[in-house]
Amino acid sequence: MSRIGVFGGTFDPVHHGHLVMAQEAVVRLKLERMLFMALNRPPHKSAPHLAPVEHRIAMLRLATRGNARFEVSRLEADRGGISYTVNTLETLRKRLRGELFFLLGQDSLDDFARWREPEKILRLARLVVVPRGAKKAASLPARVRRRVVVLEPPRIEISSTEIRRRLRRGLTVRYWTPDTVLRYMSRHGLYGNRDRS
């Protein structure tokens, strides 16, 4: 049975922390592929300045190019509207044969009980959690913990929020995100970015 990773997020923008997390999941869990899924509109956070989904998908394609196991999916972008994990996993379950592993950060797991149909999500996929700091999945209810794999990749304290903040302040983000993504952001003027290498 094939093992397929699903990595959903705003990726606003994608950075090396995302890529390291995804690669560690592929290697440690023996995944055949990792689907990167840029959310059209996130349901859990207000994102008034979110870059258009087409730009975020283009940056994902640039960042993942060259890794045969990484694949960028347009599923949520093409569906439009607010992106709900349960809907995405249901669609993938119908289209793909194999076990699904849904990759998420510790901060997302902390809010998991407030997600749409969390019990159904647990039936559709295993959750692969990347802890932040000293937080662990141990405090979760047993029924959730049984469906959670904790993955501890090398620590890279980079966030999309900090990248956007630095760019607004005129600071460089070279080596924070792949050079191809940095050039794309500059060419399209995303996040107030102009060439600051």
Image: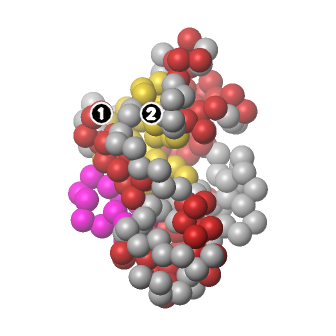
Position above or below: 153 against 83 = above
Q: Are marks 1 and 2 in contact (CB under 8 Å)?
A: yes
Q: Position of residue 164 (x, y in %)?
A: 60, 68
- The image quarter containing residue 62 is bottom left
Residue drawn at point x = 54 percent, y = 28 percent = 135
Residue drawn at point x = 48 percent, y = 75 percent = 172
Please give the residue where the numbered disc 1 appears in the rendered image: 29
Quadrant, the C terminus: bottom left
Q: Is residue 4 visible?
A: no
Residue nearest the viewer, comparing 97 with 42 = 42
Q: In the figure, is residue 170 to the left or right of 100?
A: right
Residue drawn at point x = 35 percent, y = 39 percent = 153
| Dot 2 alpha-carbon crowd within 10 angstroms: few under 14, some 14 to 19, many 20 or more | many
* Magenta stretch encompasses residue 68: yes
Q: In the figure, is residue 17 to the left or right of 76?
A: left
| Dot 1 alpha-carbon crowd within 10 angstroms: few under 14, some 14 to 19, many 20 or more | some
Callout 2 secondary element:
strand
Task: Say which amino acid is labelled 2.
Answer: Val
Q: Which mark is residue 128?
A: 2
- The image quarter containing residue 152 is top left
Task: Say which amino acid is labelled 1.
Answer: Leu
Q: Residue furthest top?
A: 142
Residue nearest the viewer, comparing 60 with 116 = 60
Q: Which residues are magenta?
A: 60-72
Q: In the figure, is residue 105 to the left or right of 150?
A: right
